[in-house]
Image (tube, helix red, strand yellow):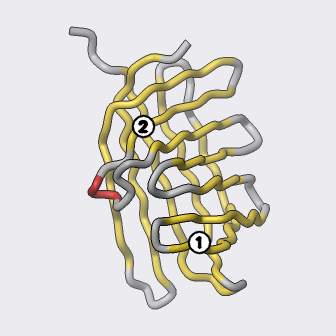
Amino acid sequence: MSKKVIISVKGTQCLEDGESDDVELITEGEYAFRNGRGTFRYEESEMTGMDGTTTVFKFSPEEVVISREGTVSSRMVFVEGKRNIFLYETPFGSATIGIDTHKITNTLNEQGGELNIDYSLHFDRMMVSRNQFLVKIKEQAVS
């Protein structure tokens, strides 16, 4: 059974030249957790550049899968120490992108917690950036 939560997603991108960019979204969403596995979902906003897109994280002790559907479409699979290739579709065109997952730290439980994914993004077999997702989930206060 899912419940309403507050989700904070901070994305950090460090380019090869040392330049860094952060985007943080704090929004309401839905969260479900059972037996070490779970899902959470939220709607992207104009601020993230993906307005009209629903993002769903599915996690287990072995992997994290991020699926996006709407104006942007993708399915990224993160497994520590592995490379994964995915198709990233936007209104402007599609690209095949690779990700190398360096580390996943997951403290999510029934009440919420944190999920941190450290990974590199590759395009045409060249590293583009080192990225990080830091997700914090908190139960909504009951009013």
Is 66 left or right of 3, judged from the image as shown? right
Give above or below for 65 relative to 39.
below
In the image, what residue type sits under mark 2?
A: Tyr
127 is higher (above) or lower (below) than 32: below
Q: Which mark is residue 142?
A: none
Under circle 1, the secondary element is strand
The kind of secondary structure element at disc 2 is strand
Out of 7 and 76, give the one closest to the viewer.
76
Residue 54, percent from left and from top: 46, 43
**Percent coordinates x, y for residue 74 in the rendering:** 60, 56
* On-image quarter of the N terminus: top right
Residue 94 tag number: 1
**Residue at the left extreme, as displayed:** 143
Q: Split into 4 quadrants, where in the image is the C terminus?
A: top left
Label disc, if present, on residue 42 of the rendered structure:
2
Q: Residue at x 48, y 31 (%)?
A: 113
Q: Are marks 2 and 1 in contact (CB under 8 Å)?
A: no
Q: Which residue corresponds to the image point at 64% horizontal and 81% vertical from the top-left? A: 123
Q: Residue furthest top?
A: 143
Mark 2: few, some, or many residues within 10 Å (few <14, many ≥20)?
many
- The span from disc 2 to disc 1 (Cα, nearest Å) is 23 Å
Q: Looking at the image, which residue is at 76% across and 41% down?
A: 62
Q: Could you tell me the amino acid type at mark 1?
A: Ser
